[in-house]
Image: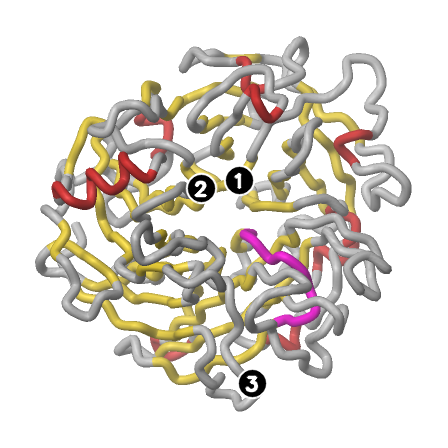
């Protein structure tokens, strides 16, 4: 979304607008609770503290800030807060596992800890917060260290987090001592239980997010490759499906999706477009020893690519995945402002269910969807990844979008990741939106300056 569009929405206090997309909105919520029919919680109220604007009746607590001391005494809270999930603990506790998308250079890296560090030269990883039944922080500690560019991931049915490295740098590149581009399993309640072991059979590529089929145990994976040819959509068939902690280390088969006759998903523009007979092709070299997976030879028929494959979640009997945008200027076959695709494994069918955009209408916020989670209302919460003012938007089953939160921490320093000046400020994007197991609290991160918020209020 352009800065102008975002700033106009911010100034007008817009709370509900017709969303700028077309498609089968109900498809997004398959298997979720019925919607309550509300269309938002009212206009956003400027925060006197200058951190987070929310609708009237909602309040936030800052759980964590980058640079503060970790309660474990292991060092400082790392920078670049990204993907996150919440898990139920004992005695009403909640465990939050949070990614840190740190590269070799950056502000504050994840401290290296014995038994939890993969590559001491890498600055990314995860931290874990433990909250008591009242939402107070009891502990904050390193959950995994020595990984790189931990962007998103996803939860498993056995309450662990799969953190994804969004890089394919090899040992010797940027000072790394080991190859990167893997998925790692993280237990927020007991990080030493999972350690720092790459799940190599799940592939080495620029991972973004995952979703697990809770019945079969198949893991679906998105790839956010930065250069053409763009990323692929994968599935991993584990040797020990739904086996619990550590079972994914037993290996399995990695396959990539081929939609016959469709080499590039961006060229599909009509919502409802459906493709039967989706094929899954074995990845020749999952470790990408010589050639990145997306460039490997998949035989006759090739393979299907898509730009900016990001969010991924399971709903009902289907897996949904997001393409945040595509641009012909980047090398895609067509331009769009965001797509949501649905794959039905039992039918081998792929359907384009939502198309976002266009970006030219300031009254229609709906460009570049990124992290997505299910909301208590039965709708969605969406983090948009764009320029200018940054929002978390709610999306109802009726196709209405409303502003749920707006960042108020302007970035005006050259050291800030998003840049900005006092005359033309930028704001840190939101990431990792998720809800507590009891659905009464929304947790969300501001990427920079790294801040984790807990938002409570009259959810319905």
Q: Residue at x 63, y 32 (%)?
A: 233
The Cα atoms of the two marked residues, 2 and 1, are separated by 6 Å
Q: Residues within 10 Å of mark 3 (few under 14, many from 20)?
A: some
In the structure shown, which secondary structural element does the residue marked by tag 2 occupy?
strand
Q: Give residue 455's position: percent from left, percent from top.
A: 25, 63
Q: Residue at x 86, y 37 (%)?
A: 291
Question: Within the magenta stretch, is there residue 369?
Answer: no
Quarter holding residue 298: top right
Query: Which comes before the other along the chain, label 1 or label 3?
Result: 3
* Disc number for residue 75: 3
The Cα atoms of the two marked residues, 1 and 3, are separated by 31 Å
Q: Give residue 239's position: percent from left, percent from top.
A: 76, 48
Nearest to the observer: residue 91 or residue 342: 342
Front label number (1 vs 3)? 3
81 relative position to 185: left or right: left
Q: Quadrant of the N terminus?
A: top left
325 relative position to 446: left or right: right
* Disc number for residue 124: none
* Disc number for residue 310: 1
Residue reaching furthest to the top: 261
In the structure shown, which secondary structural element does the residue marked by tag 1 occupy?
strand
Q: Residue at x 70, y 58 (%)?
A: 247
Circles 1, 3 touching at the beta carbon (< 8 Å):
no
Region in magenta: 144-153
Circles 2, 1 touching at the beta carbon (< 8 Å):
yes
> Which residue in the protein does label 2 denote?
370
Q: Give residue 349's position: percent from left, percent from top.
A: 55, 19
């Amino acid at each position: 979304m352009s800065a102008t569009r975002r700033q106009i929405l911010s100034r007008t206090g817009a709370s509900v607008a017709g969303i700028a997309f077309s498609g089968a909105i109900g498809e997004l919520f398959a298997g979720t609770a019925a919607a309550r029919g509300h269309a938002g919680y009212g206009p956003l109220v400027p925060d006197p503290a200058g951190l987070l604007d929310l609708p009237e009746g909602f309040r936030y607590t800052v759980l964590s800030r980058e640079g503060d001391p970790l309660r474990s005494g292991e060092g400082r809270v790392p920078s670049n807060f990204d993907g996150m999930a919440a898990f139920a603990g004992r005695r009403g506790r909640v465990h939050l596992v949070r990614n840190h998308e740190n590269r070799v250079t950056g502000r504050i890296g994840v401290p290296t800890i014995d038994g939890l560090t993969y590559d001491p030269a890498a600055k990314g990883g995860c931290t874990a917060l433990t909250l008591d039944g009242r939402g107070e922080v009891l502990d904050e500690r390193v959950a995994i260290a020595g990984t790189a560019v931990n962007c998103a991931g996803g939860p498993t049915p056995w309450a662990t987090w799969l953190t994804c490295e969004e890089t394919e740098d090899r040992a010797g590149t940027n000072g790394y001592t080991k190859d990167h581009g893997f998925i790692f399993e993280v237990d927020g309640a007991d990080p030493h239980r999972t350690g720092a072991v790459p799940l190599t059979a799940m592939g080495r590529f620029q991972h973004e997010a995952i979703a697990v089929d809770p019945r079969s145990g198949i893991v679906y994976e998105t790839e956010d490759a930065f250069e053409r040819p763009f990323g692929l959509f994968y599935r991993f068939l584990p040797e020990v499906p739904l086996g619990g902690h550590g079972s994914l280390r037993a290996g399995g088969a990695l396959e990539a999706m081929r939609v016959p006759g469709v080499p590039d998903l961006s060229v599909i523009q009509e919502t409802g477009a459906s493709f039967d007979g989706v094929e899954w092709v074995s990845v020749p070299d999952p470790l990408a020893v010589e050639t990145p997976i997306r460039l490997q030879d998949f035989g006759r028929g090739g393979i299907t690519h898509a730009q900016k494959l990001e969010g991924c979640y399971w709903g009902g009997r289907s897996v949904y995945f997001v393409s945040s945008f595509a641009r012909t200027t980047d090398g895609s076959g067509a331009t769009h402002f965001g797509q949501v695709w649905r794959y039905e494994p039992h039918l081998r069918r792929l359907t384009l269910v939502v198309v976002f955009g266009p970006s030219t209408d300031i009254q229609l916020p709906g460009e570049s969807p990124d992290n997505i989670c299910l909301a208590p209302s039965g709708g969605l919460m969406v983090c948009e990844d764009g320029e200018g003012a940054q929002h978390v938007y709610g999306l109802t089953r009726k196709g209405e979008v409303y502003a749920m939160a707006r960042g108020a921490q302007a970035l005006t320093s050259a050291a800030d990741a998003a840049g900005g000046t006092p005359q033309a400020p930028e704001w840190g994007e939101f990431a990792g939106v998720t809800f507590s197991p009891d659905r009464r609290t929304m947790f969300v991160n501001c990427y920079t300056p790294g801040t984790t918020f807990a938002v409570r209020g009259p959810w319905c």
